[in-house]
Image (tube, rainbow, N blue to C red):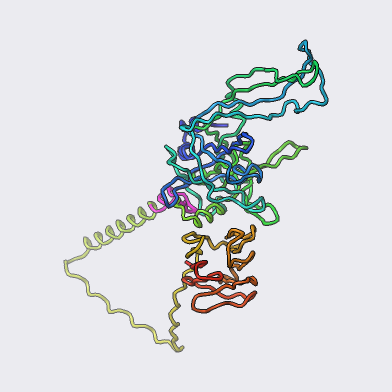
């Protein structure tokens, strides 16, 4: 297990540099408890604020997230207190076995972290999966600039990193915090009944958050696979990740993010584990929909492209040199300076077959990429036209989900989807109808094609969308 500072001294400069884009995520729960995770910077929102990616389960605490809870990025190392129920004694301090204890010995039940406002940046969750059936992704926008952040480039497609590729997991695993324990002490909590006392172990632990404290583990891609009924794309690897790594980036040797560290599976019989990262492709779709600027890396590392280009240039130069040398030799061997007559061009051989000229191929229409809201609640918002399609309505399962009391919008109003490479739309029996500008109201439950530039609206024009 290597840290970012250890790698900096070696030849993994891209990996070391990537540590400057990794952050510690804190989520304050309703009962004052904090949960921790990792995240990474990807770019800027339209208002210039830094944007970060993490896991859905980091900001939700396994689905319990709601808006009043606060999400932070920790700027510097902090100390937190962790209290464990540890033992029970009688009035003389002798250990006893107390079966009806209100707490389970050895289980943490209280985290106390005093946040210094100058050492944290609050974040808005601008996108997150609706539930565990969707890719485990959340996107955060910082309320202010996060200093010294390096946005990480994203690999255009996770499968561009082949099986066997060298990869690295970056983040802040909780066991690294435990290695930085400041102090342990024992305190009696209370007398829970006559002569029986419960004691706590209070652990003062360093909560790591600086780039030099990022933990880096390495390995290879074992396979590209899917999980769940919805076949969510994930990267399986042997790169060790622990609790706290969730939400951190899985990167290539060139520093490009290929996935988001998400979960592990362990075989209890063999005591072996496999580690999984959610494919970065899903995050790219959501960043596009949100209008976030980010850096995209093509399938081949830039250095390789430049190297190949250099070889081509060198070969071309060599060809020029050879040509010039041949011409110079020919000129030296000529008996006089006169130019030899140029032979007349060869006449084409007459064909015995009729010649047909193929008609010109019409230019292919550009493929639509986004829905852009025009008017109403979704005005200006962009949604990527993903292969799974887009369901629009008031139902929580809808990808574009309107508030429950929005007039004129049905629970499942309409759907935009791909069919044989053609973008289609279908009204799902809505109450107020779905309209395509220039074509009027469409018939329910009958798909109609959409082209780039088309505008459709739900019920009335203020609930409009343009295809771009």
Question: From what the image shows, is residue 362 above or below residue 396?
Answer: below
> Residue 254, can we see it?
no
Residue 378 left/right relative to 273: left
Which residue corresponds to the image point at 42% horizontal and 37% vertical from the top-left? 147
Q: Nearer the viewer, residue 358 or 183?
A: 183
Q: Nearer the viewer, residue 247 or 319?
A: 247
Q: Quadrant of residue 393?
A: bottom right
> Residue 27, can we see it?
yes
Question: From what the image shows, is residue 15 above or below residue 134?
Answer: above
Image position, residue 423 (x, y; %): 55, 70
Image position, residue 292 (x, y; %): 46, 52
Which residue corresponds to the image point at 69% horizontal and 29% vertical from the top-left? 108
The magenta segment is 295-309
The quarter of the picture where the N terminus appears is: top right
Q: Quadrant of residue 70?
A: top right
Residue 296 on the magenta span: yes
Total marks in image: 0
Which residue corresponds to the image point at 21% horizontal and 65% vertical from the top-left? 334
Residue 31 left/right relative to 18: right
Image position, residue 347 (x, y; %): 34, 83
Which residue corresponds to the image point at 58% horizontal and 49% vertical from the top-left? 137
Q: Nearer the viewer, residue 443 or 3?
A: 443
Q: Nearer the viewer, residue 375 or 256?
A: 375
- As drawn, the residue found furthest toward the left would be 337
Residue 194 on the magenta span: no
Image position, residue 281 (x, y; %): 55, 54
């Amino acid at each position: 297990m290597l840290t970012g500072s250890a790698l900096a001294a070696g030849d993994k400069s891209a990996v070391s540099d990537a540590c400057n884009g990794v952050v510690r995520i804190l989520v304050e729960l309703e009962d004052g408890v904090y949960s921790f995770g990792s995240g990474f910077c990807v770019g800027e929102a339209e208002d210039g604020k830094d944007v970060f990616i993490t896991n859905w389960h980091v900001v939700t605490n396994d689905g319990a997230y709601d808006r009043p809870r606060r999400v932070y990025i920790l700027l510097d190392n902090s100390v937190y207190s962790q209290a464990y129920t540890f033992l029970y004694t009688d009035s003389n301090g002798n250990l006893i076995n107390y079966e009806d204890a209100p707490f389970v010995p050895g289980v943490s039940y209280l985290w106390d972290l005093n946040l210094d406002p100058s050492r944290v940046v609050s974040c808005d969750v601008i996108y997150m999966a609706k539930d565990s059936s969707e890719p485990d992704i959340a996107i955060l926008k910082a309320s202010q600039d996060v200093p010294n952040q390096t946005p990480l480039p994203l690999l255009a497609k996770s499968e561009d990193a082949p099986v066997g590729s060298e990869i690295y997991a970056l983040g802040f695993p909780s066991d690294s915090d435990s290695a930085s324990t400041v102090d342990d002490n024992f305190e009696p909590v209370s007398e829970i009944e006559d002569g029986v006392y419960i004691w706590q172990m209070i652990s003062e632990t360093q909560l790591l958050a600086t780039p030099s404290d990022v933990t880096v583990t390495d390995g290879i891609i074992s396979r590209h696979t899917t999980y769940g009924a919805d076949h969510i794309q994930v990267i399986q690897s042997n790169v060790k990740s622990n609790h706290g790594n969730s939400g951190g980036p899985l990167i290539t040797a060139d520093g490009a993010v290929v996935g988001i560290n998400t979960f592990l599976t362990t075989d209890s019989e063999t005591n072996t584990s496999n580690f999984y990262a959610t494919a970065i492709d899903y995050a790219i779709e959501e960043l596009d929909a949100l209008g976030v600027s980010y850096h995209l890396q093509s399938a081949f590392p830039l250095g390789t492209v430049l190297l190949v280009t250099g070889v081509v240039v060198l070969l071309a130069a060599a060809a020029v040199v050879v040509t010039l040398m041949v011409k110079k030799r020919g000129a030296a061997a000529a008996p006089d300076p006169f130019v030899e007559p140029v032979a007349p061009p060869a006449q084409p051989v007459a064909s015995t077959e009729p010649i047909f000229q193929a008609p010109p191929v019409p230019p292919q229409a550009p493929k639509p990429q986004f829905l852009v809201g025009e008017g109403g609640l979704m005005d200006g918002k962009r949604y990527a036209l993903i292969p799974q399609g887009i369901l629009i309505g008031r139902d929580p399962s809808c990808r574009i989900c309107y508030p429950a009391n929005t007039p004129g919008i049905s629970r499942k109003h309409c759907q935009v989807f791909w069919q044989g490479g053609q973008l289609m739309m279908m009204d799902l029996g809505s109450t107020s109808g779905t309209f395509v500008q220039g074509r009027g109201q469409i018939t329910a439950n009958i798909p109609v094609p959409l082209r780039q530039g088309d505008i459709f609206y739900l019920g009335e024009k203020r609930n409009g969308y343009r295809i771009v």
